Amino acid sequence: MLSVDEAIVKILAGAEPLSAETVSLSDVNGRIAAVDIAARMTQPPFSASAMDGYAVRFEDVNPGARLRVIGEAPAGTPFAGSISEGEAVRIFTGGAVPEGADHVVIQEDVARDGDEITIESPQERPRNIRPAGVDFSEGDILVKTGERLHELHGSILAAANAPEVSVRRRPKVVLFSNGDELREPGADLKPGEIINSNHYALTALADHWGGEAIYLGCAADEENVVKSFFEKAQGADIILPIGGASVGDYDYVKPAFRAAGGETVFEKIAVKPGKPTWFGRLARACVVGLAGNPASAIVCAALFVQPLVRRLAGEVGDEAASFMKAKSETPLSANGGREAYLRAEAIIAGEGPLRVRAADNQDSSLLSPFTSANALIRRKPNAPAIAAGDDVEIVRLR
């Protein structure tokens, strides 16, 4: 069996970022930049007023000074002239500051009488003007190649006058379940049947990691049926069969995979939960076979599918799980020969160290621990028992 690290190396071998495509700003959230994205304009493109008031020369605004109002500058309609000694221009938030002005006195600090204003409050320093380019300048790199764009990038890039951007194509992740016992939610179950639930979490996770998840449905326990699902999935970048990963009499996924023309790279990983997780290639698709037990499927997807999705999506950085230190609130027993991942809740409390609490029941068939679990505690092979308060390694699950 391969170790976790060895499995990740084999899964990522030869995986390269997918081709680029151009998308509108409304579709950038979660996408990976294919090139550096530079500002096409300076923002703001002119010195702008930050307040409603009067644009003036700071040297003219001693308390009691009277200034003549020579025009106005609302947002979008700049004042055409310039300001000289003893003059002011009525200005509004976002309006272009006229030439010659270096200060905006707010309207609450003046008294206006016709075309004159009187300065009523001391002005400590020139202020209330946003200089041209205070946000960014034309040519500034706002997003680097390989950076994941988030919810706010659409507005940032719009302000930079970029109507569309070049991003990597999202990896197409095609999933299907396998098992005669599986029924969809809402079904009236017969004896021996269970609800098909894993694909809901896995499709959501694949989308969150940067993929485009497509669920094909549930394949019956017949080799030809499972083979047809692999054939339907061709054209995908990643195929995730869920269940049928072991070697029982009714586990048809791997024989069907080979019958469809797939090539197996490895068949087991020394990990708990999820030892039956396997990997292969079918045409250009990477195939990660996940066990049907919920914890096995979700944990191994986080460990092995997530880095593959991120690599194909072009995200720069260490695609493998990123571990951090935490204090365990619960004692943990000695670990066996496989690297183990315990569902746990990471807790941030004040300025103290990150704390983590392992779920009481780690059975691989259980979904309920995931209601609060937001992390996995990593237990290396043959790790000794630890007491509450000892350090552990964790990886964030969500």
Image (cartoon, rainbow, N blue to C red):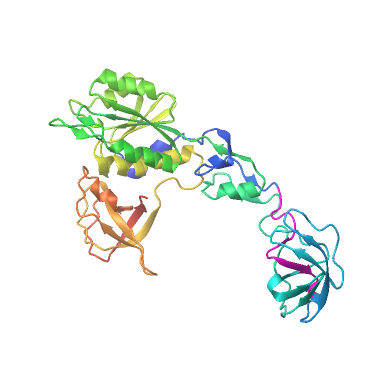
| Residue found at the far front of this picture | 114
Is residue 132 toward the left or the right of residue 257 in the image?
Answer: right
Count of marks placed on residues = 0
The magenta-colored residue range is 41-58
Q: Nearer the viewer, residue 144 or 165?
A: 165
Is residue 286 inside the magenta stretch? no
Quadrant of res 54: bottom right
Q: Nearer the viewer, residue 278 or 228?
A: 228
Quadrant location of the N terminus in the rendered image:
top left
Tell me if I can see residue 205 in this picture: yes
Q: Position of residue 77 (x, y in %)?
A: 77, 54
Residue 69 in the image: above or below residue 374: below
Residue 289 in the image: above or below residue 320: above
> For the point 79% across and 61% down, which residue is it?
72
Residue 139 in the image: above or below residue 13: below
Q: Position of residue 212 (x, y in %)?
A: 44, 35
Q: Position of residue 270 (x, y in %)?
A: 27, 42
Is residue 56 inside the magenta stretch? yes
Q: Position of residue 271 (x, y in %)?
A: 27, 44
Quadrant of res 218: top left
Is residue 120 toward the left or the right of residue 142 in the image?
Answer: right
Q: Nearer the viewer, residue 40 or 236?
A: 40
